[in-house]
Image: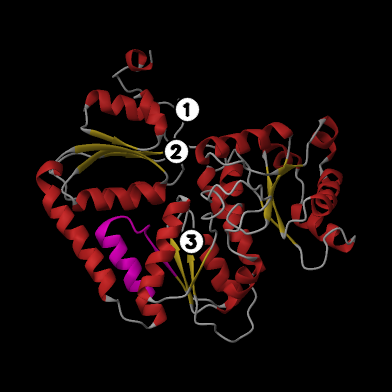
Amino acid sequence: MLLRHTPKEISERKALMINPAKTCQPIGAMYAALGIHGCLPHSHGSQGCCAYHRSTLTRHYKEPISAATSSFTEGASVFGGQANLLQAIENIFTVYEPDVIAVHTTCLSETIGDDIKQIRDKAEKQNLVPPGKHVIYCNTPSYVGSHVTGFSNMVKGMTELAQSTGKKSGKVNVIPGWVEPADMEEIKRLSALVGVDITLFPDTSGVLNGPMSGEFKMFPEGGVTIKELKAAGDAAGTLALGEWCSADAARNLDTKCKVPCKVLDMPFGLAATDRFVDALRTIAGVSVPEEVTRERGQLVDLISDMHQYLYHKKVALYGDPDQLIAMTEFLVSLDMLPVHIVTGTPGGKFERIIKKITAGLPCEVNVKASSDMFLLHQWIKNEPVDLIMGNTYGKYI
């Protein structure tokens, strides 16, 4: 039905989004919080919001996602949810005993104007937060930005735990952006091969892709520890992979603890991975080992072997800005033609970067931020492509 009813004729839309290429901020904050060991994400809003975010992540990762909620009712919606959150903090530490509670807001609590920092401070003064435990928070109004914004805000909230002793540890902080647990494992593997000791945060590897042991664990073994987050303030430097997901946290850490930061594209493909490895090597003062050089050579050989099949194939892309920028550069390096590129996340800077990357292509490139899958489908109907790259929502196209 969708295939037949999407018109080829494109008209300007000002107040309508059809099949958006994004979701709301809190789901990004929840995913980021799961990358802390012993952390229980907390949704400061209604039960329905929390249930949606948990079910979405559970469906994707096929793992049970634990999260708490302030359970707003009509009273909290009108008069504020301070009492709900204070009660929740006390109950969570008593019943579930996490190392940290990561609070994110929702449309409801943002609209009523709850001051989460003030509530957190009040909880500490009332001794509702046990010694050695922590409550971090971020503001994630769903009517601003996207899930990418929420992820960025929560990672920035993590950096508030960082402390500087004035003595550098020699470690390197790596903020991976919104990638899968397997990608985080690969970043750690590659860093270890180069000989660089990194602190990866958030780190959902071991949390959302752990082994089947037959034993239930409220808090899986994976994730960055509170001890590691505190020590991040003594690192030699920070590499932020992606402007949209990671840069704010890295810059906040630089401001707070004077840890120099460098913002890179996500290491997709040859050129971006070269920049990542070179940045690791430079900060840590090490040489690139032969094993990494050999793996790089294998990729170059594969690109050469497959060139005849990929040359000038047209591609439509949709997803998150950081991933699309890295993927577009990779496709251009393969002599493919990314002709339609859409993200639901706002940002004119994204469009400028994509246009710069694709400037030398022998075709016109359509790119739009804060857009939707409906427009992408219209573009494809007007100019068909050989390949569509994105998540499973592309099946409707």
Q: Please give the residue where the numbered disc 1 appears in the rendered image.
A: 17
Residue, x 36% and y 59% (percent of image)? 265
Q: Please give the residue where the numbered disc 3 appears in the rendered image.
A: 247
User: Looking at this rendering, what residue extends furthest in the left direction?
Assistant: 308
Tag 1 secondary structure: loop
Label 3 CA crowd tier, 10 Å (few <14, some 14–19, many 20+) = many
Residue, x 41% and y 71% (percent of image)? 192
Distance between mark 2 and mark 1 Cα atoms: 10 Å
Distance between mark 3 and mark 1 Cα atoms: 28 Å
Nearest to the observer: residue 379 or residue 198: 198
Tag 2 secondary structure: loop
Q: Which mark sits nearer the N-terminus, 2 or 1? A: 1
Amino acid residing under circle 3: Ala
Q: Is residue 87 above or below residue 384?
A: below
The reply to whether the C-beta atoms of the residues labelled 2 and 1 are less than 8 Å apart is yes
Relative side of 198 to 141, left or right: left
Image x and y of residue 41, in percent: 67, 49
Q: Please give the residue where the numbered disc 2 appears in the rendered image.
A: 344
Tag 3 secondary structure: helix
